[in-house]
Image (cartoon, helix red, strand yellow):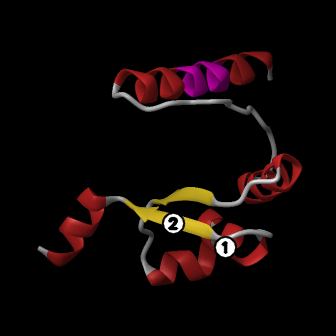
Amino acid sequence: MERAEREAREVLNKQVAHIKDIGGTVSQSYFRQGHPDREIVRLAEEIGAGLIVIGSRGLGGMRRALMGSVSDSVVRYAHCPVLVVRNQEHEAELWD
């Protein structure tokens, strides 16, 4: 468990560094464990977020219906607006 947590924190730190490298600003980052959709909604409520921005992997309708989707669940249960950002590369593959 400790190794998994350490590796997850490293991924988070690398993402923060990447955002800063491309000129973005990161005011705060948060590490949570649990069901991603529940933790995202819970954190947004705790910090009083006015908007949640979340990525979408672009699962097909059948896979999403069977497995569910983190972004779908966040949209359903969030207390504030949610902006779902699609993967442009995956979208291009669907239409080519």
| In the image: residue 15, left or right of residue 3 | left
Mark 1 belongs to which amino acid?
Val
Point 27% across, 68% down: residue: 91
- In the picture, the disc for residue 60 is none
- Quick one: SS at disc 1? helix
Point 50% across, 28% down: residue: 15
- Pinpoint residue 29: horizontal percent, then vertical percent: 67, 31
Residue for badge 1: 75
Q: Does 4 sit above or below residue 72?
A: above
Q: Are marks 2 and 1 in contact (CB under 8 Å)?
A: yes
Q: Does 83 sit above or below residue 3?
A: below
Q: Residue 3 in magenta?
A: no
- Pinpoint residue 68: horizontal percent, then vertical percent: 64, 73
Q: From this viewpoint, which residue is outermost toward the right?
A: 46
| In the image: residue 9, left or right of residue 16 | right
> Which secondary structure class fits the magenta region best?
helix
Residue for badge 2: 84
Mark 2 belongs to which amino acid?
Val
Q: Does 16 sit above or below residue 96?
A: above
Point 17% across, 77% down: residue: 95
- Pinpoint residue 59: horizontal percent, then vertical percent: 45, 70
Relative to the observer, which residue lies in front, 12 or 16?
16
- Quick one: SS at disc 2? strand
Q: CA distance from mark 2 to mark 1?
A: 8 Å
| Mark with earlier residue (2, 1) | 1
Q: Which residues are magenta?
A: 7-13
Place residue 66 in its image quadrant: bottom right
Point 70% across, 17% down: residue: 6
Place residue 58 in its image quadrant: bottom left
